Amino acid sequence: MMVHNCNAITKFADENQTVDETTWGHAGYGESGSGITTRLMNKKVNKGGQTTIMSDSHRFRPRAYIHRHKLNSPIAQMTRRGTVELCHLLTDIESMILPQDPTDRTLSATSFLFDSSGEPTQATTSPVTIRKDVKKIFRKKPVVCADNFFFDDKMCEWIGAHGFGCLGTNARNALPKEIEKKYLHGQKHTSGCKYSKVARFTNPIVAVKNSPGYQRVHISFQSTNSTNITSVNCFNECKLFIEIRERGRGKNKRVWGIEMNDGRRMYLSTYFRIDVVDHLLKNAAIFYRTWKYWHAPKNHALAMVIVLAHDIYLECAEGKINIEWKVEKKKQLTFFQFRQNLSTQMLTYSPQKVKYPGDERMRAVTGLPKLKRGGNKKKQQAVSLSQLRSAKRHKTSRLCGNLDKLCTHVASIEKTNTGRICAWCGKQGAYARCGKCKDDSKKPVALHYNNSKGEGQGKMCFYHYHNDSRFGLGKNDSTALLKQPKGDWEEPTPGEIDDNKSHIESLTDQL
């Protein structure tokens, strides 16, 4: 359902996809300190399961998935588990690709490749089975990035014949068979070898194979061990360039350059998407011990939904989809803040509000009389974010924050025929008393309020007294809170008011 809903709200998917496995562990039940959970911290576990997921490379948007087990049916005479899983995933998304027009390069699945002469050649496309019940979100056949578990010679040939593209590491035991191993990086890691402790290149290699309809490129890779990258229908060129690396700060800052090419750069920019998701799944902390092993994959899926929801929130907060949704970078919620707010909303929400699809079928709603159900109530119109932003943009805006509490104080005002000393300015002629505020003798506080004549004419003492930013600046506050002599109080200057406002705001942050 998560993958289906993600595809349903997508206009166009990324043309670069990342494939990798995500692991859910089942520790079973054990006493504290038994060490059961510690055995499930790595990628591979002996208790639990894994799911292979295909997602957009630049954002977490799952497009297809397959559960890992031995019963997945082989495809095209491929029996290796990784290649079978990748074939199933590509077959699933093939029905999500828009119909291709061979004459239109913008929507064509063909790619312009390069040969040994440097002249571009055009690869052919494979026919796509069009399904009307699946949303078309791929403008052309994507390039899939994965590790060496999913690639070998047969897989690359299958991908090329079907018009897809691929990019990933190549295992030492699955190197191209048509090239002698002495020309490739296939040396095993030697324990204690000093060369394996530093990243280096050993005779960089770029090998190109032109086949009918596709092109395969083999590239050496920078690593502490023998590593290779293989690709199909992926590059227009593979030129060398230098990338800058920096470490340290100030006088200790070090800058150097490393050799790079298009294949290595593209792989390093796309391979890690599922690994980032696994890290966030761990931070979601949705875990408990139980003998019911099926709870583990269920909790794993719930955590993945939270990660997906937060990633969608970040995309909406950029404002590129709708400017009304834009949130400043500093004000965007972190993953932990988003998870906390999401938990609060879920715990306080009731289906009786009938706000989301499916609420009308919940028992809490169907058990109510039809006239009392939320869906039958006329929805009240509300202002939009753009209207609120426009109304609060200027200092002269009519909106002054939440005044509900002040209104209760205004409603409690008592008028008297005898003037008293004002609690804010210390002057005579206060004929109004705030029934909500009491002085030390438990009597209502006297304040100048809308006086039309006399000494309090035009004074805003009532509002200053209830203003957070002026707390402590009034005459009564000066004597009762700050213990200053009555005769020393003076009307605060604009500078003193600004300083006090900043001080109150800093104290408010500590509440």
Image (cartoon, rainbow, N blue to C red):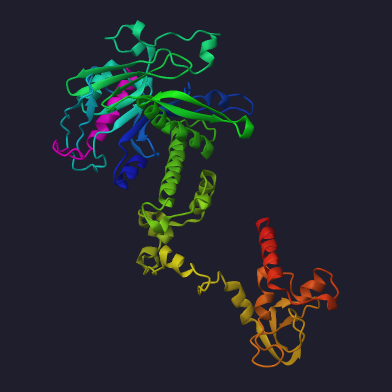
Q: Between residue 242 and residue 50, name the one nearer to us.
A: 242
Residue 231 shows in the view: yes
Q: Between residue 303 and residue 246, name the one nearer to us.
A: 246
| Magenta-drawn stretch contains 84 | yes
* 186 sits to left or right of 436: left
Where residue 438 sits, quadrant-wise, is bottom right
Q: Is residue 332 above or below residue 182?
A: below
* 288 sits to left or right of 471: left
* 151 sits to left or right of 502: left
**Image position, residue 483 (x, y; %):** 84, 70
Residue 24 shows in the view: no
Q: Quadrant of the image for the N terminus?
A: top left
**Image position, residue 359 (x, y; %):** 38, 55
| Magenta-drawn stretch contains 334 | no
Residue reaching furthest to the left: 103
Q: Quadrant of the image for the C terminus?
A: bottom right
Q: Between residue 158 and residue 244, name the one nearer to us.
A: 244
**Image position, residue 440 (x, y; %):** 80, 75
* 79 sits to left or right of 386: left
Q: Residue at x 49, y 28 (%)?
A: 26
**Image position, residue 429 (x, y; %):** 73, 89
Q: Between residue 307 and residue 464, name the one nearer to us.
A: 464
Q: Which residues are magenta?
A: 80-107
Q: How many marks?
A: 0
Where residue 90 sits, quadrant-wise, is top left
Q: Residue at x 66, y 72 (%)?
A: 467
Q: Residue at x 27, y 18 (%)?
A: 208
